[in-house]
Amino acid sequence: MKYIKGLITAGVLICAVVLLTGCVTTPIADSVEIENVTTDNGTYHSGEIMNITVVLKSATDVSGVYTNVSGIANKHGRNMLFEETTTNLTRGLNNVTFAYTMPACSSCSGISEGTYHFNTSVVYGNVTVANSTYSVVLKQ
């Protein structure tokens, strides 16, 4: 019985040391989220620049976070928009920005006037930790 109490005490002490030294951390999936995705306008014309701002909320400092925006698919299913960047996040809100030239509306590009969607993905350590979809209108 005395031996078992000693093992339990040793186990509790080892767990306390591991927790106090920081060896156990919050998983990144719980630490980063997409707070908001915005564009500078809701409606764009062919050839206009669309500025996209992705606001990431981080519970801690994280380096090497990959963010991409992709979508605005043409009639052939090909994404016309694909922008990406890798950034370091600090605790709190972080802005990640992209500038994209809207495609021309034409039968050759496979893009016509209408509402188009794009997806924002946040990846850390080969694990997708957040996704969000946003819509914009494209006119001639």
Image (spheres, helix red, strand yellow):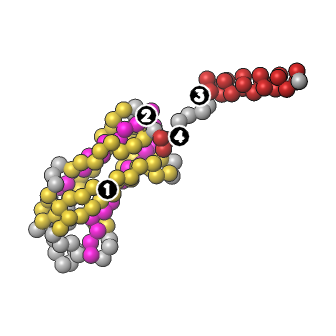
Query: Where is mark 4, residue-wise?
Result: 27
Query: Where is mark 3, residue-wise?
Result: 22
Q: Residues within 10 Å of mark 2 (few under 14, many from 20)?
A: some
Find out whether the residues at labels 4 and 2 contact each other: C-beta distance under 8 Å.
Answer: no
Left or right placement of residue 114 versus residue 94 in this view:
left
- Which numbered disc flags the more N-terminal residue, 1 or 4? 4
Main secondary-structure element of the magenta-colored stretch: strand
> Is label 1 in a helix, a strand or a loop?
strand
Disc on res. 133: 1
Query: Where is mark 2, residue-wise?
Result: 59
User: At which x and y percent is residue 57?
Assistant: 37, 38
In this picture, which residue range is highlighted in magenta? 49-75
**Residue at 15% in and 69% down:** 113
The amino acid beneath tag 2 is Ala
> Distance from label 4 to label 3 (Cα)?
13 Å
Left or right placement of residue 9 versus residue 55 in this view:
right
> Distance from label 3 to label 2 (Cα)?
15 Å
The amino acid beneath tag 4 is Pro
